[in-house]
Amino acid sequence: MEYQISSGIVDSYFHKFKKILNVDVAIVGGGPSGLLAAYYLAKNGQNVVLFERKLAPGGGMWGGAMMFNEIVIQHEALHIAKELGIDHKIYTEGLYVVDSLQATSALIYHASKAGATLMNCISVEDVVIQDKRVGGVVINWAPVHREKLHVDPIIVVSKAVLDATGHDCEVAKILERKNGIRLNTPTGGVVGERSMSVDEAERTTLENTKEIYPGLFVSGMAANGVSGSFRMGPIFGGMLLSGKKISEIILKSIHTLV
């Protein structure tokens, strides 16, 4: 029995691991925009892998606001909550409160059930460049990355890469720092996140959700971070709408490659 347990896990995991070495879309970061993008892309027939360095995907949505496990979404994003079966109750005109644990669990469940492969405990430490286009990511175990061990990585090839790493916009920073290229941002580089301004941040989250270099896309707080916009706190409508918008942009981009 002991051997069968271990053998079953190893066989199943490495079958899954081999499947994600060549994908349509590699998503870096398992916050709400990344998870929702994974859901919509997989639902539209794309082979999608999402890498999350922590034990559980979900990003900042788990903690609600200061560990009060409630979050707010706007009316504009309510149709997404309804599509995913997330309970919600109106608080004031145009604003709804949602249990953050239920919402995060729903995003993870639906992304996985749609066919996206979710890989936790894995860090992305570099990107692949092919013909002046981002063509994949370079991965390693998160503890290897954290402890700075000298262990060579594995390469994942993809048609598109989504930076959904949140406030740090890590993939965009790697691309800029290591390759001396210009990004599709106001300065040509990663501008950095500004302080809180909720209305402005919600608006610009969608505006900044785009392709910033051939093959590299940004969503959620990474979108605002690269373009120098504001943070918004525990309101998540813009994050959800950003995840849906970037899935549509990536689908169009992939279709032009065929």
Image (tube, rainbow, N blue to C red):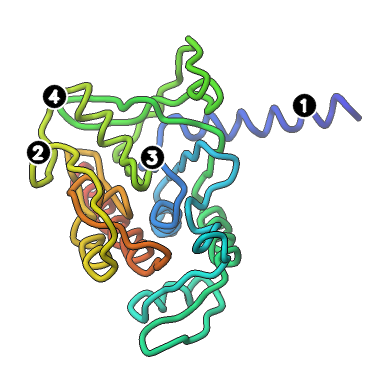
Lateral position of residue 221 relative to residue 22, left or right: left
Specify the label residue 188 is tagged with. 2
Dot 1 or dot 2: first in sequence order is 1
The residue indicated by pointer 4 is 180
Check contact, mark 3 vs mark 2: CB within 8 A: no
Q: Position of residue 22 (x, y in %)?
A: 41, 32
Check contact, mark 1 vs mark 2: CB within 8 A: no
* Identity of the residue drawn at 47% across and 87% down: 90
* Identity of the residue drawn at 49% across and 49% down: 116
- Which callout, 4 or 3, points to the residue nearer the camera? 4
SS assignment at label 2: loop
SS assignment at label 1: helix
Dot 4 or dot 3: first in sequence order is 3
Specify the label residue 26 is tagged with. 3
Q: Is residue 235 above or below residue 8?
A: below
Judged from this view, the residue extending furthest toward the top is: 150
The amino acid beneath tag 4 is Gly
Count residues near mark 2 (Cα–Cα under 10 Å), then give few for <14, some for 14-19, many for 20+.
some
SS assignment at label 4: loop
Dot 4 or dot 2: first in sequence order is 4
Dot 3 or dot 2: first in sequence order is 3
The residue indicated by pointer 1 is 7
The quarter in which the N terminus is drawn is: top right
The amino acid beneath tag 3 is Ala
